[in-house]
Image (spheres, grey):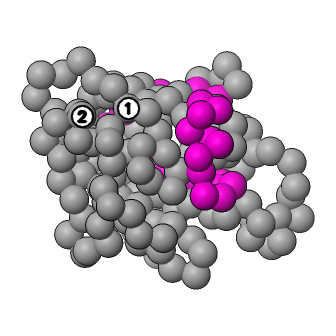
Amino acid sequence: MGNAAVDMNSNGQTFHSVESFAQAAESLEVPWTISSQENEFSASIRRREYGGLLFGELSYGLCSGTRGNREISRSNDDYICLTVYNGGRMLLEQRGEVMEAGECDILLWDGKIPTRFDCLAPSRCEMIWLPRKIVERRSGFSDEFEGQGSPGSSGLISGAFTGNWRAFRTGNSTA
């Protein structure tokens, strides 16, 4: 699943303009259209594929992104995305519902539903893109996943899991 704009090396790829980041985001297996009004912009993408799953680490400055019907039709497969935010602040919108994500928050959202995001602070996240066919086979779900978040919302990811993840990420685990 290699592509020309984002390589598979362990260091990933760094971008120093929104134009170069936008071009790379358009070429991913799950493409996005990216824009920013910032004069100085930086971002990085590191991605891996293993056993049909896509793993990504992203960092980016203030920007917005859209995944509409054009981007969805160019996707290689249907994906469900689990995103863990390691820093920053973002708004994610699907079907008119807006979810806010910040440090240590987790979102589970559907890659085949048109989506928009607004990055409100420079952000870092880790993502696992799960092929829908694997999720359906393992979970029995076959409907579209609505964007789900935690904590503070009734979602697929529980607040207890988020609290444990926060402790793990910050090294404050009591277990």
Say whether residue 22 is left or right of residue 112: left
Dot label at residue 90: none
What residue is rendered at 56% in x and 60% in y?
A: 129
- According to the picture, the residue beneath numbered tag 2 turns out to be 19
Looking at the image, the residue that sits furthest to the bottom is: 51
Name the residue nearer the viewer: 50 or 23: 23
- Residue numbers of the magenta segment: 68-94
Say whether residue 44 is left or right of residue 3: left
User: Where does the image place residue 163, in percent across and percent down from the top left?
Assistant: 51, 54
* Residue 69 falls inside the magenta stretch: yes
Query: Which image quarter: residue 4?
Result: bottom left
**What SS does tag 1 mark?**
strand
Query: Which image quarter: residue 147?
Result: top right
- According to the picture, the residue beneath numbered tag 1 turns out to be 34
Say whether residue 171 is left or right of residue 166: left
In the image, which is nearer the foreground, mark 2 or mark 1? 2
